[in-house]
Image (cartoon, grey):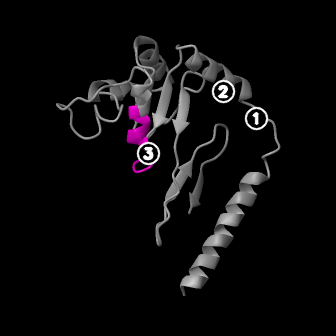
Amino acid sequence: MAAEAAAKKRRELSSCVLAGGKDAGAADPHADEKARLRAEMAAGRGTAYFVHIQNAGGTSMCKMAQRNGLAAPQESPEESGVFGRNCNPSSAEAKRIWKGDVAAQRAWRQGSSYRFVANEMALPPQLAFGDFLYVVVVRWLVRVGVRARVRVRVRGASQRTTTT
C-alpha cells in the first residue's frame, strides 16, 4: 500500500513539473517591472511585501530582514493574534495594507518608513503590482500524509487550485 501511494505521489509531482515546464522558455512579460523593483530595493527605496506562509521559515525571514537593516514592524506585545509579530503590521495598519484596495496599499507604502512588511493572513483581493516586491518562501514538507491545497492567482488568468 505504501509503495502504491509513493508511486502515485511521484506521478502527481512529475505532472506538476511538466505542466509548469511547458511555458518555461517563454519570455517573462513582467521582467522589466521585477528588475525595477529589485533595483529600488537595492537602492534603499523599495518595499518588500512578504507573504508569510506559516511553518515555511517566515519568522527567520523577518529576523534576517531586520538584521540586515530593513525597517520593519517591531514586536508589539499589546497586540493580539499575528498583529505586531514577525514583521506583521499593527492591527490598525493591517486594514490598509492587508484588506485595502490598490489605492489604500499604495497610500500605506508611500506614508510608511517600512521597507519590509509581512502578511501572515489572507492576501488582499487585489495586489499593488509594481509598488511592492512580493516575496514568498515555500518549503516542501517531507512528511507522510501531508496534503496542502493551494490557490494560485495569476494576473490576467483564472484561479487554479493545485493539490500536493
Horizontal placement of 117 versus 78: left or right?
right
4 to 128, vertically: above or below: below
The residue carrying mark 3 is: 57
Q: Report the amino acid beneath label 1.
A: Asp
Residue 115's x, y, as percent? 45, 20
**In the rendered structure, which disc, 2 or 3, sits on the residue that comes first in sequence?**
2
Task: State which mark lies toward you, 3 or 1.
Answer: 3
Q: Report the amino acid beneath label 2.
A: Lys
Identify the mark at residue 28; answer none if there is no mark: 1
Residue 72's x, y, as percent? 38, 24
Farthest left residue in view: 78
Task: State which mark lies toward you, 2 or 3.
Answer: 3
The answer, for residue 121, to whether it is visible in the render is: no
Q: Main secondary structure of the magenta part?
A: helix
Horizontal placement of 28 versus 127: left or right?
right
Q: Are marks 2 and 1 in contact (CB under 8 Å)?
A: yes
Horizontal placement of 31 versus 80: left or right?
right
Residue 112's x, y, as percent? 40, 15
Horizontal placement of 117 versus 29: left or right?
left
The residue carrying mark 2 is: 34
**Looking at the image, which residue is at 72% across and 53% down?**
20
Q: Disc 2 and disc 3: Cα gap in Å?
A: 23 Å
- In this view, the residue in front, 32 or 44, is 44
Q: Disc 3 and disc 1: Cα gap in Å?
A: 27 Å
**In the rendered structure, which disc, 2 or 1, sits on the residue that comes first in sequence?**
1
Callout 2: SS? helix
Would you identify the image quadrant in which residue 154 lies?
top right
**In the rendered structure, which disc, 3 or 1, sits on the residue that comes first in sequence?**
1
Callout 1: SS? loop
Q: Was residue 162 drawn as part of the magenta stretch in this picture?
A: no
Farthest bottom residue in view: 1
Q: Which residues are magenta?
A: 54-63
